[in-house]
Amino acid sequence: MQTLELRGVQKSFGSLNVLNGINMRIEKGEFAAIVGPSGCGKSTALRMFAGLDQPSGGEVLADGKPVTKPDPSRVLIFQEHALYPWRTVEANVGFGLELAGVDKKEKKKRVDEVLEKVGLSGFQTYYPSQLSGGMKQRASIARALVMNPEVLLLDEPYGALDAITRLSMQNELIRLWRGTGKTMLLITHDIDEAVYLADTIYVMSPRPGRLVARIECGMERPRNRNGDEFVRIREQVMGHLDIGSYEI
Ligand code: ADP
Ligand code: MG
């Protein structure tokens, strides 16, 4: 598994200063979350870890080495599940293996294994249009997992799901993380989701995004959303987000 690091990262798009001197270090196998207001540069930071964007200043490192391009060891999962509508679940999940030239039998085995892991056994022949939102998101997670990445970069993966599905997907994500030990970096605008899931929460300021807090959540899992410690950390995150000062 890999460590992920930003060292003094600055990012501008033309004259728009998006990230302003960000430092963070996520350890191997850690579950980290970033929360921050819309437009503060969260997705930009994640895209840099994925090798899809370069910093204007500072360094982006994976396992101590500069990230200069995408690598199959780090996959990005986002809200729009981007499944191919004309491919079955099995063909969607197996697509990367197909491109990599993995033979049919091996591909089938790995696809079946990963579908089992995300709770989609038996849905191999379904098309995306026949699946619920939660199932589509599971299929896109399966598609990432089948390539056996070391790092999962999750950009508001549950943003499009209803509240109840979202809660059960959070439990699934924890189960998956525990079962695989992968390094996880989750972006979410849902404070409770961050407190429920993460070992470490990074709070960002409005654009230009700076880190305003790094909060450790040492609570045992499964976490009680109404427990004293949970409520205390939620308030701490809210305090750093300074929501009362936003214009409405
Ligand atoms: P977040 O994910 O925190 O909502 P983003 O990282 O997507 O924020 O975007 C931060 C800011 O950078 C936004 O104002 C957005 O419009 C701008 N931005 C993002 N990508 C580009 C791009 N490729 N070109 C120009 N501006 C961009
Ligand atoms: Mg975003």
Image (cartoon, rainbow, N blue to C red):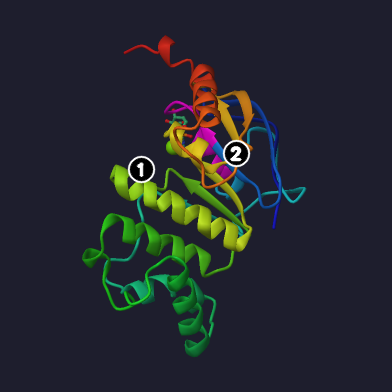
Q: Residues within 10 Å of mark 2 (few under 14, many from 20)?
A: some
Residue 32 position by quadrant: top right
* In the displayed structure image, the side of residue 86 where residue 191 appears, left or right: right
Residue with the mark numbered 2: 219
* In the displayed structure image, the side of residue 246 where residue 42 appears, left or right: right
Q: Residues within 10 Å of mark 1 (few under 14, many from 20)?
A: some
* In the displayed structure image, the side of residue 190 where residue 202 appears, left or right: right
Instruction: Single out the mark in the foreground, 2 or 1.
Output: 2
When the figure is inspected, residue 223 is found, relative to residue 15, above or below; the finding is below
Q: Is mark 1 within 8 Å of ligand 2?
A: no
Q: Is residue 221 magenta?
A: no
| Span shown in magenta | 34-48
Of 242 and 155, the residue lying toward us: 242
Residue at image location 53% in from the left, 24% down from the top: 232
* In the displayed structure image, the side of residue 1 where residue 52 appears, left or right: left
Q: Quadrant of the C terminus?
A: top left
Residue with the mark numbered 1: 159
- Residue 239, can we see it? yes
Residue at image location 44% in from the left, 28% down from the top: 39
Q: Secondary structure at mark 1?
A: loop
Residue 9 position by quadrant: top right
Residue 150 x %, y %: 63, 59
Q: Are marks 2 and 1 in contact (CB under 8 Å)?
A: no
Disc 1 marks a residue whose amino acid type is Gly
Residue 116 x %, y %: 44, 73
- Residue 76, can we see it? no
Of 162 and 84, the residue lying toward us: 162
Residue 88 x %, y %: 31, 74
Of 26 and 175, the residue lying toward us: 175
When the figure is inspected, residue 194 is found, relative to residue 103, above or below; the finding is above
Residue 237 x %, y %: 52, 24
When the figure is inspected, residue 112 is found, relative to residue 142, above or below; the finding is below
